[in-house]
Structures are given as C-alpha cells and as structure tokens.
C-alpha cells in the first residue's frame, strides 16, 4: 500500500548499488506503476534508464506515463532507439500526445518516425487538433458495437477488443457509417439477457463533445453529468474518440492552478514551481510586476497634484496607506469571488447587472463598517490631539467618508473587471488582486484628497 | 444532447402551464437526469414538486441527486411524506449523506426516521465519521466476491448484485472475515477464462483509504493512481466502503474554490456566490476586512514616526503608495505560487530552506528590476526638477534602494508565511494576498523612510 511502497525506496537504491538486478526486478514487480514512477523520478539519469531496462515492456510503458515530461525526456535521451520505440508504441495515445507536445519539434518528429504505421496515424490525427482542445485529450482506444448485435456477441466483442481499450466501463454503439447512436454502461450489458439485441437496451440519449471544443468544456460536461468517459464526435456525428475522467481531472487541476497563479498577479507557470527554471520564473513574475509598477507610478503623479494639501496638513499623508489598501483588499475579495464563480459556470456574463447591484450594496456596507472602526480608533485614542492636532474630529470624518467611497469603488472594480475582461475575450483570471489594487490605489488617492479638501476647507486646508 | 436539452426548457414550461401532463412526462423521459435537474431548478417551488410527481421513482431519485442542497430542501418541504420517503430511500448513500449534512439537525432526524431500517443503518454509519473525512464520502454499494469463486460464479454474482452498486468497474475481493485482499477491474474478469478461480487472477496489490482519512487524501491518491474508485478499510483492514472518482472530483473542485476565496482575503463561502445570502456574505468578507484594517492602522502609526521627515520633504510622501504596493505585489505572487504548490503536494514543509533561498534570489532580482525602472522614470522625466526639486538624483537613489529592500522583504514574507501557517497547524491558504500586503506595508514604510533618512541626510533632511 501507499506508505509501504515509500519505505521500499532505500532498499531499491541498495539493490541497484550492489547490482543485484534479479532481486531488484522482483522487488519492482511488487509495486504499483505510479510508485515505480516515483522511485525512478528520484534516481540519477543513468540509474533510471537501467531500472527501465529491467521492467517488462508493458509495465515500462505504464510507468513511463506516470513520469513528468522532464523525466520522460531525460529517459528518452538515455535509452536506445529500439527501447524508446517500444516505450512510445506502448503508451496510450493521449499520454503519447501529451509527451510529444512537450518536446522540441525536431525531437517530436524523430519520435513519431519510431512509431509503427497504425500508431503514427493515430498520433498525427490527435496532434492535428488545436492546443487545449478536446481533440488533444481524446484517445481512439474504446470499444464500439453495432446495434443489431446480440448482448452475447457484444460480450464476445468486448472480450476480444477490450484489452487495448482505455475503458470498458462504457461501450459505444455506432451505425454502419460510424455515427454514434448511444453510449451504454458495461453494467447494462452485464445485467441484460444474452439473447437480446444491443438495440433493445438503448435509450438513444447521450452527451457528446466535439473534437474542436475547448478542453474546459470537457471538464464542465464531465462534472455536470458525473460520467467516467465522454464520447467525442466530429461535425457529422461520427465517433472519433473518447475522453476519460482521469485526463479531465488533470485538466481541471491544471486550470485551477493557472487561475490561482494569474490571480496572484503573474503569468501562469507551465510546470511545477520547483521545476521551473530561475530565468523563466523571473520572466513570468517580472513582466507583470513591471506593468503593475508602471501603473502604480500614477499614484505618485496623483499625489503630486495634492502636494500643496499635504505640505499644509502632513497628518493627511499618514492615512494614505490605510485608505488605499482597504480599497485594494475589498477589490481583491470581490474579484476572487467572481473569477471563481465564473470558472465554475455559476455566473455568466449576462448576470453582470445582478452582480453589480449586489456588490455596490456589499461595498457600501463594508465601507461603512471600516469607516466606523476608523472613527472609534481616531476619536477615542488617548493621544488623538497630540497625533492628529485639534481638528481630529474633522480628520476622522474625512477618513471615514473616504473609506466608504474607496471600499465601494474597490468592490465595484474588483467585481466588474472579470466581466469586462471576459467580454473583451481575455481570461477573467487576469483580473488579479494586484491589478485591481493598482487600479484602486490611484482612484482611492483622488477620492481621499478630494474628500479631505472638502471637509477640511477653512480649518486645516 | 447538451445544447438540444437546453432548447427544450421553454417547451416544458408551456406544457406545464397547459397542464398537458402526459406529454410533459413523455418529454421529460427523453432527457438526461442532470438536465431534468437543471429544468426543475429553474421552476417555482410548487411547479418543481409537480414535475417531480410525474417522474418514475428511480428517475426522481436520480434527478434529485443532481439538485443543489437548497433546491433539495425546498422540494422536501413541498412533497408529501410518502413521496419524500421514496426519494430519500432511492438516493445513493453518499448523496443522501451530503443532503442530511446540509439540513438543520431536526429535519435530518425526521428524514432519517423515514428511511427503511437497512438504509437507516448505512446512513447512520456514514454520518458517524468526522466531517470532511473519507467516511462521509464513501458508499457501501459495491460488489465484492470471494477469492475461491470461479470467474463464472463471480460474473453471476455481479449480475445479481451489480444493479444497486455505485460502480461495477472495480470488483473487490475479500476473505471470510471481510478483509480486503485485492481490487480487480471488471475488464480483468471479462477477459479471463470463466473456469478459472478469482484467486488465480489476483496480484494482491491494492491501494486503500482509511475511513478516518481527510478527504484531501482521497483526492491525492485518486490523482496519483489514476483510479475510478478506491476502497476504504477500517483499522483491521476490513472493507467498509468505496469512494468513486466523481465524488472525489467534486471534493477537489470545492477545495480549490476554498483556497481561491481564502487567498482573496476572506472566509471561504460554503455555497455558490449567487446563492449565498447577503448577511453571511458580508460576515465572511467583513470579518477579514476588519482584521486587515486594524493591522493596516499600524501604517498610520509607522508614518507618524516619520512625520518630521515628511513635513521637511513632502516629496517623500509621493512615493509611499508606489513603494509599499510593489512589496505587496511581489508578496502576492510569491504566496500564490507557494500555496498552490503546497496544495498539489509539490512542496512539503521540509523544503522551506530551498524555497527561501530561491525566493531571496528572486526578490533581489525583481527589486533591482523595479529599482532600475524607477531611476529611469525619475532621472529622465522632463519635469523632474519641478516635481522632485534639485535633489532628484538623491530621491531616485532613495526610492530605488528602498524598492530592492521592500520587494525582497515582500517576496520572503509571501513565500514563508504559508510554511509558518502550516507549521502552526493552520491552512496555508490563509496567507492571502491582502494579508501579506498588510504585513509588507508596515515594514515597507519603515524600510523606505529609514533609507531616505540615510540617503538624504544633510540635503533635504
């Protein structure tokens, strides 16, 4: 089991060091492919290649599919051509597509050349679909039966062709032209009378993806219908492949990671944090950081306009960070809520007005809350007169009124920006907390100094 | 298919209005349960109850499981006791548990009383496990076989008991005492010789969850091993249930949503944004917003210490928002990266030093980048002398040096806070961008004014 396998790690290192390959092979055969992949991932390149040569071919392909793309590439350079050909041919088509996509184009072409003609055709078909499309995710390894077959014939067919299928949990029924008629669960076949025809157990209700659909559509449909596999059809309704739940779960996880990184104010990394090189990491962070910095420079310009007010009442400057950060925080909450709700399909772009009204009300309430806290803090602070001068009541009023305005504006900006970005065809997740904060900082300064100038006219200013 | 079903919506509303119930029933029977649930979700309460009474009992239970908990509760209050009993008894145990958890305790007790004795025992067993545990997620509806059976006997057994099982894709092999020996895929049984014993096709390698494991462990294992179902055993190794991929996908999605909302600086909502009441929404946002506001008040205190410097050189105040927000943005990037990498299991707590060294280097590089942009912007700006006075070169130096310090500090704070929170037993996702920004704002001000005081001593200050 899981913990047990992890304990075996050191022993395997020892067997490898002592060149006791028969024992090593026996120990490896006890393990799950995913766990062998974990072990191989922790080895030096030449040792990893050595372990791979010990594995039976089928198991080797299975283990290979669990490695990450960096480890796969290093193995490919360390194994001979014949061994690589066996590996690549043994992979499931969807895993093979994922591998080839990660490769430099010339390496990918060399690998495609190693494939046998049938596998090569399958791979090239899948690679013809746009990136992040359902076509790249699908596998052509499924079992299909004719409606006129009997259940017994269908079972024979499944026994014959099921070995290479990605799933036998769902069986696809197609007509003479290859058009999808229905998908049936294996349990329906198992539980039916063997003499019945397949046609008699069909309900002809099915849900299918198109090969050119965005892969997020696969996540949404799989979630909506709670399926383990979904069929993929072309524009004529002809069955061209299936996508399975495990691949879709990987996509859902990758999309959530992308969103979280974008919402943190950076470009999404394509590979795990620790495997991202230092230079790409800096590029993906530095780019957005510089853009935000240039935007934030407007705050210096905005404050420049109020330099006169600040020099007459330095006390005003003390509250600048407090006020603008409160607007930024309120905006960050609003945009996180809306972006996630959009990603889950809970909110569509047509609902913007409903969201706006709700967020204006939230912003006013939250701003009033913070305004009250500010009044209490300034008016009842023992050192109020020494810190803020004799007009501390007026300062408290200016700060509180500004807070209501800034928090409301932050909430509106944070909630509407995802709608605007989506409307313009961008990813709503680009409405990161830092982006909203920058927007709110500049506006917040203008709101604050305008309110202060009005409230304090004739006294401090 | 999907789009087609959506189009049927208006027609069904019309049939309902014209009381053409036979036609309505026929139209509904054409649809997928998930789509009927969509339609029912859009109807008034009494209409929804009416549609439900038209559905055959099995289908009604199926549709019911696709409704969200609010809709389920409203249906339960609108349907008679007998109908509710049929519905609740017809639900899969895991869906039933989810429903009962959402209900007020007294309603849940009333519903449990409506269950037949066998279903009641199952439900009470599942409800005995801690919240967010694997026990709450599992279903006892699986097929188990004895190792000494033949494949043909096993097939008969699957035919007999498979109808009520959550999955027949994986069959579980247990010994006389009920201890799990192995899990086998249906394809292995389908493809085996019917005269063989089950024992002869076992490899006795399996991965099992414990009923008291956190449900995130189920997500991690399911992901790691690419399974459609995982068995759950108690402390003695006895099989007590299974969890299936669709439930685990729901958990993974819910956990990502929680993380995103926490990282946005608020408490996680338990229900979708649009279904969250206004009062709970304000509470979950206002709480954190107030805490952050109280923390941010320290910026006013910190700036108070430098009031003398500001009054002598008001120009210093102009750069305050720029500098502190750059630190906050850098911190937001770092904490988003680290929190997600932790959630995906890419980074464990033991790796803190490696991450720290990497982030110090990133912070210095990114700070230097922003510092250079600031120098260019201040030194080459046409109105530099008018805006910043004759000592603009010194101001540029003070701002740039501060940026290096503040961005580095922000990066360190953002990356280390998740480690500290996890070490203390809190959720790392609580290290939200606003939380990090608040921390960095106060420190950033101290760094900036200290650097400025040093650089500008004898000239402006």
Image (cartoon, coloured by chain):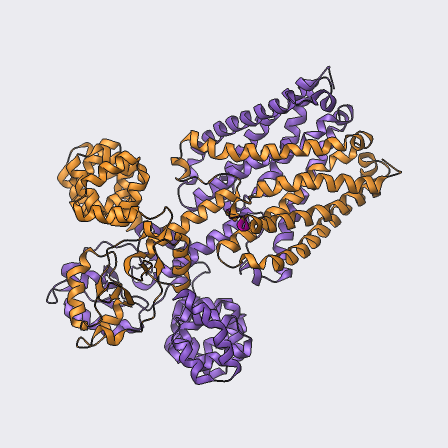
Chain colours: A purple, B orange
Q: In this picture, which residue range is highlighted in magenta?
A: B422-426
Q: Residue B87 at what x, y percent from top left?
A: 20, 42
Q: Residue at x 50, y 85 (%)?
A: A19
Q: Residue at x 73, y 24 (%)?
A: A387
In the current view of this chain or complex, which residue is farthest to the left? A195
- When asked about the image quadrant of residue B69, the answer is top left
**Quadrant of the drawing holding the C terminus of chain A:** top right
Q: Is residue B387 left or right of residue B365?
A: right
**Quadrant of the drawing holding the N terminus of chain A:** bottom left
- When asked about the image quadrant of residue A210, the answer is bottom left
In the current view of this chain or complex, which residue is farthest to the top? A458
Closer-to-camera residue (A443/B461): B461
Residue A14 included in the magenta stretch of the image: no
Q: Can residue A148 be seen here?
A: no
- Seen in the picture, residue B10 relative to A389 is either above or below; the reply is below
- Seen in the picture, residue B93 relative to B145 is either above or below; the reply is above
Q: Residue B249 at what x, y percent from top left?
A: 37, 53
Closer-to-camera residue (A237/B398): B398
Q: Can residue A121 be seen here?
A: yes
- When asked about the image quadrant of residue A186, the answer is bottom left
Main SS of residues in magenta: loop
Q: Residue A322 at what x, y percent from top left?
A: 64, 32
Q: Is residue A44 left or right of residue B158?
A: right
Q: Residue at x 62, y 60 (%)?
A: B354
Q: Residue A276 at what x, y percent from top left?
A: 58, 61
Q: Residue at x 20, y 72 (%)?
A: B148
Q: How many marks?
A: 0
């Amino acid at each position: 089991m899981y913990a047990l396998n992890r304990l075996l790690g050191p022993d395997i290192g020892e067997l490898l060091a002592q060149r006791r390959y028969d024992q090593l092979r026996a120990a490896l055969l006890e393990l799950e492919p995913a766990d062998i992949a974990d072990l191989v991932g922790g080895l030096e390149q030449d040792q990893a290649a050595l372990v791979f040569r010990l594995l039976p071919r089928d198991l080797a392909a299975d283990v290979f599919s669990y490695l990450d793309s960096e480890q796969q590439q290093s193995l490919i350079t360390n194994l001979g051509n014949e061994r690589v050909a066996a590996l690549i041919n043994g992979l499931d088509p969807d895993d093979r597509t994922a591998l080839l996509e990660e490769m430099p184009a010339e390496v990918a072409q060399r690998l495609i050349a190693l494939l046998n003609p049938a596998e090569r055709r399958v791979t090239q078909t899948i690679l013809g679909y746009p990136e992040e499309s359902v076509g790249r995710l699908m596998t052509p390894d499924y079992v299909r039966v004719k409606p006129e077959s009997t259940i017994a014939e269908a079972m024979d067919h499944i026994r014959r062709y099921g070995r290479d299928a990605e799933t036998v949990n769902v069986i696809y029924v197609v007509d003479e032209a290859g058009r999808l008629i229905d998908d049936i669960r294996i349990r329906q076949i198992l539980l039916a009378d063997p003499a019945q025809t397949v046609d008699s157990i069909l309900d002809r209700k099915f849900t299918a993806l198109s090969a050119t659909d965005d892969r997020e559509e696969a996540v949404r449909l799989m979630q909506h219908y709670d399926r383990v596999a979904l069929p993929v059809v072309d524009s004529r309704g002809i069955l061209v492949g299936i996508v399975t739940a495990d691949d879709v779960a990987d996509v859902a996880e990758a999309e959530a990671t992308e969103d979280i990184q974008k919402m943190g104010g950076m470009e999404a990394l394509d590979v795990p944090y620790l495997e991202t090189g230092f230079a790409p990491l800096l590029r993906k962070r530095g780019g957005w950081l510089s853009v935000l910095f240039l935007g934030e420079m407007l705050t210096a310009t905005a404050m420049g306009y109020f330099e006169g007010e600040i020099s007459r009442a330095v006390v005003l400057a003390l509250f600048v960070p407090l006020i603008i950060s409160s607007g930024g925080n309120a905006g960050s909450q609003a945009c996180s809520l809306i972006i996630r709700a959009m990603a889950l399909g809970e909110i569509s772009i047509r609902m913007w007005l409903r969201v706006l009204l709700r967020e204006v009300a939230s912003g006013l309430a939250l701003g009033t809350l913070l305004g009250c806290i500010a009044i209490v803090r300034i008016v009842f602070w023992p050192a109020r007169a020494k810190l803020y001068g004799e007009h501390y009541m007026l300062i408290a009023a200016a700060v509180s009124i500004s807070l209501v305005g800034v928090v409301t504006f932050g909430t509106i900006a944070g909630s509407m920006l995802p709608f605007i970005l989506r409307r313009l065809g961008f990813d709503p997740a680009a409405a990161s907390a830092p982006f909203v904060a920058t927007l709110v900082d500049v506006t917040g300064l203008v709101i604050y100094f305008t309110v202060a100038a009005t409230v304090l006219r004739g006294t401090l200013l």
